[in-house]
């Protein structure tokens, strides 16, 4: 199984080692879209696009078997095929279709419109069972392209270069602040940079401008909340709570995201206590990228695993209450944070 990131895919295509099957996915949706464009370009520059939410499997089977006329490959792009929502006959037909792909065909699956993990969080999460079946089948002979956020350092370099390209200046601290506000998501960063460059109008994009003009992503606000809780800063914590509730995120997902961040901090505090480094923690727990680990190491400084464990126990109790019956979700969440803030 070949599993590549965007850079690995670029190298594969540069060496003209084109696969006949691709599955492109990951939380960085802009990077996913860019990878699909690169594959299509390498396959001849054009592709037949299929809506994966309602695929016509008979027509798709005919399309797969066509011989290319004016290009080297018959390229087909299947967008957002969620195996969990297809009927059983469709799923079987889709899997059988993979066996029909010949050497003259490049079949690309990509996912940007749904969560292949089914709402699961954590660094070791796996795709839902039916999507995993498709991914594993493609992985046997094809290429999986996983697009996760880049490191803070990489993004800061790209952001400052993007500012220069648009006639503006931007110091590295401001670029890092933008990356953090956007949760290291390339699409969000590009959208916010367009707004910032227009506002700066050829001048400097400052860190203060970023903090005032860029709306934080969910994960960024969760990090702000955990940091305030662990340092007993009640005012900052409740301000973050108000921002999170205003986002109208489903409460089970919000609590799971908060718990996942706390677990990162707990691991970092334990690693620090035992003398292990951020790099070792990344390897120990199979993190896909190091940015979350670096942030957890920074934010857990001075904290003990016992303190963080108490917060996790309160979250666990709240989640049980959330799923045990009718509760006021907002009150439950706010009360849980208040209890975390008690010494």
Image: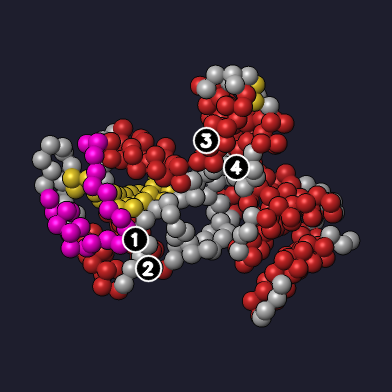
Disc 4 target residue: 182
Q: Earlier in the sequence, mark 4 or mark 1?
A: 1
Disc 1 target residue: 53
Q: Which residues, given as a range, are shown in magenta? A: 44-66
- Horizontal placement of 167 versus 51: left or right? right
SS class of the residue under badge 1? loop
Disc 2 from disc 1: Cα separation: 8 Å
Q: Earlier in the sequence, mark 2 or mark 3?
A: 2
Disc 3 from disc 4: Cα separation: 10 Å
Q: Residue at x 76, y 68 (%)?
A: 331
Kindly check if marks 2 and 3 are in contact, taking CB atoms under 8 A apart as contact: no
SS class of the residue under badge 2? loop
SS class of the residue under badge 4? loop
Judge whether 233 appears above or below 195 on screen. Answer: below
Q: How many residues crowd around disc 1 within 10 Å: few (fewer than 14), some, or many (20 or more)?
A: some
Disc 1 from disc 3: Cα separation: 27 Å
């Amino acid at each position: 199984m070949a599993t590549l990131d965007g850079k690995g895919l670029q190298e594969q295509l540069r060496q003209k080692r084109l696969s006949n099957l691709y599955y492109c996915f990951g939380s960085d949706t802009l990077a996913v879209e860019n990878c699909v464009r690169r594959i299509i370009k390498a396959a001849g520059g054009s592709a037949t696009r299929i809506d994966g939410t309602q695929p016509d499997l008979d027509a798709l089977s005919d399309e797969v078997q066509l011989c290319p006329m004016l290009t080297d490959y018959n390229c087909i792009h299947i967008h957002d095929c969620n195996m969990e929502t297809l009927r059983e006959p469709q799923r079987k037909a889709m899997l059988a279709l993979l066996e029909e792909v010949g050497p003259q065909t490049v079949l690309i699956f990509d996912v940007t419109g749904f969560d292949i993990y089914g709402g699961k969080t954590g660094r070791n999460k796996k795709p839902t069972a039916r999507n995993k079946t498709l991914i594993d089948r493609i992985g046997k002979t094809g290429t999986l392209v996983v697009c996760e956020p880049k490191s803070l350092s990489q993004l800061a370099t790209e952001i400052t270069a993007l500012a220069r390209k648009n006639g503006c200046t931007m110091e590295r601290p401001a670029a890092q602040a933008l990356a953090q506000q956007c949760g290291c998501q390339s699409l969000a960063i590009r959208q916010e940079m367009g707004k910032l460059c227009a506002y700066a109008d050829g001048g400097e994009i400052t860190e203060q401008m970023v903090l005032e003009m860029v709306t934080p992503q969910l994960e960024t606000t969760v990090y702000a909340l955990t940091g305030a809780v662990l340092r007993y800063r009640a005012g900052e914590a409740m301000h973050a709570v108000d921002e999170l509730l205003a986002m109208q995120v489903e409460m089970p997902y919000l609590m799971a995201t908060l718990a996942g961040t706390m677990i990162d901090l707990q691991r970092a505090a334990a690693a620090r206590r035992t003398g292990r480094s951020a790099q070792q923690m990344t390897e120990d727990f199979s993190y896909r990228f190091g940015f979350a680990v670096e942030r957890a190491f920074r934010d857990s400084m001075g904290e003990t695993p016992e303190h963080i464990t108490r917060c996790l126990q309160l979250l666990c109790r709240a989640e049980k209450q959330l799923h045990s019956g009718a509760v006021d979700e907002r009150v439950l969440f706010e009360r849980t944070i208040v209890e975390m803030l008690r010494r």
